[in-house]
Amino acid sequence: MRQRSLIAVTAALAAGALTLTACGSRDSGDKGSGSGTDGGETVVIGVDVPLTGDLSAMGLGIKNSADLAARNANKQNLVKGVTFKIEALDDQAQPSAGQQNASRFVSEKEVLGVVGPLNSSVAESMQKVLDDARLVQVSPANTGPSLSQGPNWQTKKERQYKAYFRTATTDAIQGPFAAQYVVNTAKKKKVFVIDDKKTYGSGLAATFTAEFKKLGGQVVGTEHINPDTKDFSAVATKVKNSGAEVVYYGGEYPQAGPLSKQIKATGAKIPLVGGDGVKDDTYMKLAGAESTGDLTTSVGAPVEDLPSAKQFVADYKAAGYKEGYSAYGGYAYDSAWAVIEAVKKVVDANGGKLPSDARQKVTEAMQNVSFDGVTGKVSFDQYGDATNKQLTVYAVQNGAWVPVKSGTYTG
């Protein structure tokens, strides 16, 4: 599922790129990020996420949270002479759309950083486009290890794109963390593994499976599903007949919810376990009342429980966004703030002004960005990965995701 081929950036695309005005992004309907300075220079932070479709709940939470970071930076006049705005583009969770959005961001000189995308498969299509332009990218949600550590990350880690960073930890940790919980805490030894064949889902399922076997568990069946359908009755029957004690699903909540519901409808009253792509409140609506006991892992600790996130939660509510911040809100805020901090470093080092090679300088500065963020300490290792490796297991209880264990992988 690697999307390495690049769509040519045509002259028509460049000519058709919208000029950003003080009203913000025309595509997203965003009304700007507030202003803390008059005059001076404008720095645009691009946001690439699914704003429509099944995954829009997560995408809109990312967009709003990045916008909140820009608003707060402007209110604080954090970078004197610079006003931050966001431009949010809809990738519809599709690699081709993400690649086109990356080309558009590159064509707009005011864009000095990009937050996103949500999906690892979309990130694969954007990385080279942004890296070639020295335009820094910080994802709040990508967890595929190969994005930062190369296709052979399990045997030889190699960073391919210096412009790529992320504030979320990777599936090299998340999958095994889930396996440890399933075997050691939930005491389940027989698993049926299902994935959606996409970069994120298949990668997560693979790292879970490897650790599950290592811990003495037995994989009693595997299956790949088509994420474009909602009829999983055939695979649900296979799960029931396999004798599995638990199902592990590598994928996202639009499919995980119906899958869980249909498995339980066969009489197999066993929990479905997923990764961070499953952790959205929409999951319970799709999975139904019998989803109680289903599990998911997600990056970091619950935002609501973090002292460092109290101001973010209050500010988000006060800002009046129509949508919730969802699973990645805190990470999106920190991703946007990382871009802002990198811009500040560059401006401060250049006598209070943006240099002519601002994009390259911002990308270089990002490597040494370090601050206390919404999600805790934010900084990056030599691969551009988050140094914060914490994860949390959540269980469905009374129709809500409830944290049941936080920690780090101890492999």
Image (cartoon, rainbow, N blue to C red):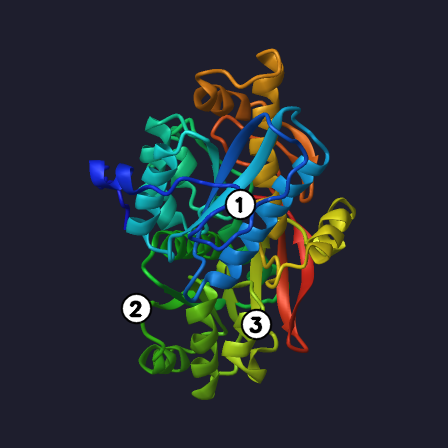
Q: Position of residue 95 (x, y in %)?
A: 31, 50
Check residue 226 in the rendering and tell me which mark sits there, or answer none. Answer: 2
Residue annotated with mark 1: 140
Q: Position of residue 270 (x, y in %)?
A: 52, 78
Q: Is residue 383 above or below residue 190?
A: above
Label located before the other in sequence (2 or 1): 1
On screen, residue 351 versus residue 108, left or right, reads right
Tell me if I can see residue 369 in this picture.
no
Q: Nearer the viewer, residue 131 or 397?
A: 131
Mark in front: 3 vs 2: 2
Q: Is residue 195 above or below residue 272?
A: above
Q: Position of residue 117 (x, y in %)?
A: 44, 47
Check residue 77 in the rendering and tell me which mark sits there, or answer none. Answer: none
Find residue 266 and report its image quarter: bottom left
Residue at 41% across, 70% down = 255
Query: Disc 3 marks which amino acid?
Result: Asp
Q: Position of residue 111 (x, y in %)?
A: 45, 33
Label 3 neighbourhood size at 10 Å, few (<14), some (14-19), many (20+)?
A: many
The reply to whether callout 1 and callout 3 are in contact (CB within 8 Å) is no
Query: Disc 2 marks which amino acid?
Result: Asn
Element on which disc 1 rests: loop
State the separation of the CA atoms marked 1 and 3.
24 Å
On screen, residue 131 versus residue 116, left or right, reads left
